[in-house]
Image (tube, rainbow, N blue to C red):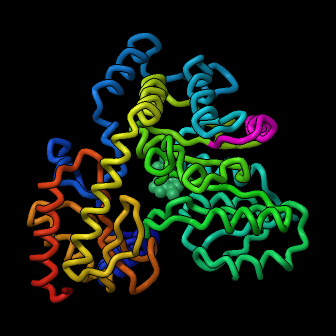
Amino acid sequence: MDGFERSLLDSLSAKKEKGLLRTLHPIDWKQEKSVFSSNNYLGLARDERLKKAAIQAIETYGTGSGGARLTTGNFLLHERLEASLASFKQKESAIVFSSGYLANLGVISALMGPGDVIFSDELNHASIIDGCRLSKARIVVYRHADMDDLRNKIRSAQETKKLIVTDGVFSMDGDIAPLPDIVEVAQAHGAWVMVDDAHATGVLGETGAGTAEYFGVSDRIQLLMGTLSKSVGAEGGYVAASRTVVDYLRNHARSFIFQTSLSPGVVASALEGIRIIREEPERRRRLLKNARLLRDGLTKLGFTLVEGITPIVAVMIGEAEKAVRFSARLEEEGVFAPAIRPPTVPQGSSRIRVTLMATHTQSEIDQVLTCFEKVGKAMRII
Ligand code: PMP
């Protein structure tokens, strides 16, 4: 073994000792019902209608798009998907990327650059952080959802182009960003706002359009970003915005320009997923009801949760190694809910991240509560 490989192995061993080693975990799809960690919130990734739409598109167009959007990879299907997203998000236009990760990377790095400033919530998703870094703009991180901190920091900014960027629903804590306050601060200081609604699309708002709709502030948010890989049940990312912004991104967002476009099957299933989200609000209601049932049950048992209403339920454990053991014990009991550890979350705040789905039944939720009670008592957490 040479020095290069030795250094990699040493780094992995050090991670393992601290309980921070990440390993892949194959999921048997037949056991989805005991999986309490999926982002397939509405169950649409297994919906027959999405499957059929994908199969039909594959039969018609093939499995791969064969090119980037600006070359040979632009099908009418892609344009229909963008039109559907613009209408869903109540914006003039939308642009689709191959993933939410690439959307954040492309949008932020295209719109912002040296001489500009970005205000970013400290708990924003990694793809936002990477997009900010790639832009080379000045990055100012404000304390999580802390509007006083944001106001203090934005007050002294001299840059002309200012962007405030936040998750709509925070992916590891499940709380909702204070958008009414954020848009007020933005307006007072001539800043634009970008919201990453990966976890709120299909979940919050009258029509499932997300946190901006939930708070009634969609028209005051310039950039509504989201992913097609969670509630929508497919894959891909997007931003809905003004026509000018979308035209600009088509010309400047490198992760849009230089990537092969989404495959037809994925695009067709996303279109069907959005249609169902808009036409079947009962799925959303069931999801939020399930979230309430589990949150109430866990609180009653004595667990500490990050408070909220969303289907992302963070059950605080503390040390990474303890959270890993807790998760392993849960799995022995038949429930899959992973431990989330640093660097994804801050030191000492390792947790079990449980996510609900609209398709979970009351008896499955009861089973999860029974397992948490058993493991929690055995490990003296409750
Ligand atoms: N933003 C947030 C808040 C996310 O949670 C995720 C996915 N974990 C992404 C962006 C990236 O989306 P995708 O998985 O579609 O790349």
Above/below status of 250 relative to 71:
below
**Count of numbered circles in the view:** 0
**Quadrant in the picture for residue 130:** bottom right
Image point (29%, 71%), residue name = 352
Position of residue 167 measured from the top left corner of the image (x, y, whole percent): 57, 61
Residue 240 within the magenta-colored segment of the rendering: yes
Image point (78%, 70%), residue name = 138
On-image quarter of the N terminus: bottom left
Position of residue 341 measured from the top left corner of the image (x, y, whole percent): 37, 75
Q: In the figure, is residue 122 to the left or right of 285?
A: right
Q: In the figure, is residue 285 to the left or right of 324?
A: right
Residue furthest bottom in the image:
380
Position of residue 316 measured from the top left corner of the image (x, y, whole percent): 33, 79
Above/below status of 263 relative to 29:
above
Which of the pair 266/363 is nearer the observer? 363
Image point (45%, 38%), residue name = 235
Magenta residues span 239-251
On-image quarter of the C terminus: bottom left
Magenta segment, prevailing SS (helix, strand or loop): helix
Q: In the figure, is residue 219 to the left or right of 72?
A: right
Image point (40%, 17%), residue name = 58
Is residue 39 something that shows in the picture? yes
Above/below status of 261 relative to 176:
above
Residue 316 within the magenta-colored segment of the rendering: no
Above/below status of 62 relative to 181:
above
Is residue 172 something that shows in the picture? no
Position of residue 221 measured from the top left corner of the image (x, y, whole percent): 70, 52
Which of the pair 295/103 is nearer the observer? 295
